[in-house]
Each structure stands twice: as C-alpha cells, then as structure tokens.
Image (cartoon, rainbow, N blue to C red):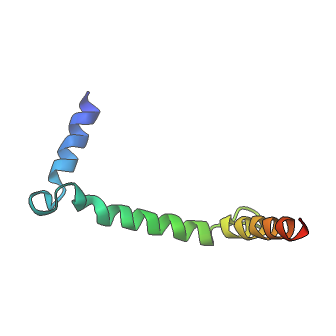
C-alpha cells in the first residue's frame, strides 16, 4: 500500500495537472519512445540489432512472395 501512495504523490506533483490533465505525461512518453528507438538502432547484441533482423525478415518475405 505504501508503494501506491508514494506513486500517487509523485504523479500529483508532476506539473501541468490543471491545464493538461492526463496529457501532461505525453512529453515523458515521447522521450521514452525516442530512447527505445535509439537503443533499437544503436545497441547491438553480437553482430545484430533490431533493424538488421527486421530487414532480413522483410527480404525473406519478399523472396517468398515473388517465388509464388
């Protein structure tokens, strides 16, 4: 119960409640989305990252469609 009370206090202290309501959190989610996109592009696990896997999958789909 203490966790939810402290979370509620944090959310109530976030600025812009009077004018923006629930939409005051949009800049936070925009920044989090940009950080996720940046990590998907630049972080590599071994020799691969998200976009290399995605491009490989799209190429495989195009080859399968053209062979049918």
Q: How many marks?
A: 0
Most distant residue in the left direction: 18
Task: Out of 4 and 17, give the one closest to the viewer.
Answer: 17
Most distant residue in the right direction: 67
Name the residue: 86% across, 71% down: 66
Most distant residue in the front direction: 68
Query: Considering the image in quadrants, where does the N terminus appear?
Result: top left
Task: Out of 23 and 36, give the one closest to the viewer.
Answer: 23
Image spot of residue 64 (x, y percent)? 86, 64
Name the residue: 70% across, 66% down: 54
Image spot of residue 60 (x, y percent)? 82, 66
Answer with left or right where residue 43 lies relative to residue 64: left
Displayed quadrant of residue 53: bottom right
Query: Considering the image in quadrants, where does the C terminus appear?
Result: bottom right
Answer with left or right where residue 27 lies relative to residue 58: left
Image spot of residue 4 (x, y percent)? 26, 35
> Where is 55 relative to 28, above or below?
below
Answer with left or right where residue 16 lies relative to residue 58: left
Displayed quadrant of residue 59: bottom right
Image spot of residue 65 (x, y percent)? 83, 66
Most distant residue in the top direction: 1
Answer with left or right where residue 45 lies relative to residue 66: left
> Where is 58 relative to 22, above or below?
below
């Amino acid at each position: 119960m203490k966790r939810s009370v402290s979370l509620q206090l944090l959310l109530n202290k976030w600025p812009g409640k009077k004018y923006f309501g629930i939409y005051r959190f949009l800049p936070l989610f925009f920044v989090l989305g940009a950080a996720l996109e940046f990590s998907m592009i630049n972080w590599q696990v071994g020799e691969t990252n998200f976009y290399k896997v995605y491009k490989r999958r799209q190429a495989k789909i195009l080859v399968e469609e053209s062979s049918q």
